[in-house]
Image (spheres, rainbow, N blue to C red):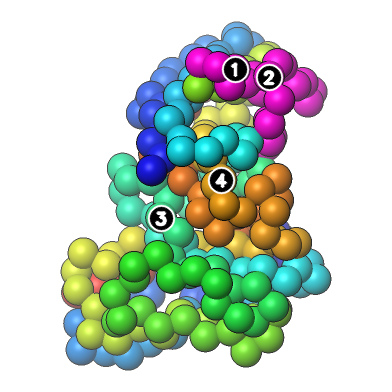
Amino acid sequence: GQNIDQPTEMTATEGAIVQINCTYQTSGFNGLFWYQQHAGEAPTFLSYNVLDGLEEKGRFSSFLSRSKGYSYLLLKELQMKDSASYLCACPSGGYQKVTFGTGTKLQVIP
Amino acid sequence: ETGVTQTPRHLVMGMTNKKSLKCEQHLGHNAMYWYKQSAKKPLELMFVYNFKEQTENNSVPSRFSPECPNSSHLFLHLHTLQPEDSALYLCASSQGLRENTEAFFGQGTRLTVV
């Protein structure tokens, strides 16, 4: 089976840096996704990590440690529009069996 | 515009009604999915279709009946639903079923069963 844990809510200040953590327990590891979902909108792809280390994409970076079953999403220079839910997800056996975390609702305040 | 369009965006139905949710993708993908998103719960995969063939039914009750007439269209037929079926139903598509395949989601249908 698979289990994914992430904090339910976080608050951060505009212009700051925030780190959203995700821990997972999977029967077989096939990478880890991060998606962003604004309220009332579709989830959109942010990143996919399958190797250890940090991958940077502009203001967003994603980190993976397979030995620790741990990932984080790092958001720099926070903007008000970054207020959204951030979903961590692990596929297994092909995309058919994706397990999502409950999502972390991030609120960016002035 | 996400490339995946769902209609209707909102639906209120009684427990004895029959309704259908529609999903259309304009991305040329061959795999399509239905997900259920309830408040404070993870996204739950319901069904997977690949090249119009159903490849996954994640123990979904028979009151939910999917239909995939072609790789671009996916339906979810609903009948005799329960109030606990109220949720956001999301459609997604992807190019293939590999583990690193990015999914593209529609904006969802907010379903309320009364």
Q: Are marks 3 and 2 on the same chain?
A: no
Q: Residues within 10 Å of mark 2 (few under 14, many from 20)?
A: some
Q: Quadrant of residue A59?
A: top right
Q: Is residue A99 visible?
A: yes
**Residue B14 visible at all:** no
Q: Nearer the viewer, residue A46 or A70?
A: A70
Q: What segment is highlighted magenta in the picture?
A: A46-68
> Which is more foreground, mark 4 or mark 3?
4
Q: Which residue is mark 3?
A: B44
Instruction: Please name which of the two marks, 3 or 2, marks the residue nearer to the observer.
Output: 2
Return the residue at label 1.
Answer: A65
Q: Which residue is mark 2?
A: A52
A60 falls in the magenta region: yes
Cα separation, mark 1 vs mark 4, equals 16 Å
Q: Alpha carbon of mark 3 to alpha carbon of mark 2: how far?
A: 27 Å
Q: Amino acid at mark 1?
A: Ser
Name the residue: 27% across, 67% down.
Answer: B85
